[in-house]
Image (cartoon, rainbow, N blue to C red):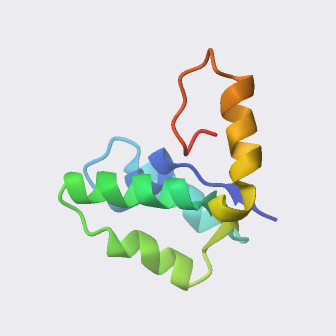
Amino acid sequence: MHLILDTGPWVALHCKNDKHHAWAKAQFAQHTGSFLTCEAVVAETCFLLARAGFDPSKALALIERGVVDLGLSLGEQASAVRGLFERYDNVPASLADA
């Protein structure tokens, strides 16, 4: 079973001083399947980790080990993502949100 992984928990997992670090660590430890995310969340996670002084390569290592799977290729899903932006144009959203 996959769980969807967003930026917040992924950053908290790697940032020991994050107030949600212990919670994120427990969630990753208890889930036996892989986590599902997209390229935009990977980029956002790496950016935030680097900005906070943490090593973004640790997030990429989870992809390499199969803990995190990329379930959406923007190149293949650009029309669907664009449709979400158009449909919800009254809601502020980043690419990772869409």
User: With 96 as the anchor, is 12 left or right in this view?
Assistant: left
Answer whether residue 15 is visible to the viewer in this image.
no
Q: Residue furthest top?
A: 90
Residue 33 lies, with reference to residue 49, above or below; the image says below
| Residue depicted at 66% across the width and 32% down the height | 85
Residue sitting at the far right: 1
How many labels were placed on the picture?
0
Could you say where residue 17 lies in the image, as x and y percent from the top left?
25, 50
Give me the residue at 62% from left, 81% from top: 66
> To which quarter of the image does residue 60 belong?
bottom left
Quick one: quadrant of the C terminus? top right
Q: Nearer the viewer, residue 7 or 75?
A: 75
Q: Is residue 24 left or right of residue 70?
A: left
Name the residue rendered at 51%, 37% in the picture.
94
Q: Residue furthest bottom?
A: 65
Placement of the N terminus among the 4 image quadrants: bottom right
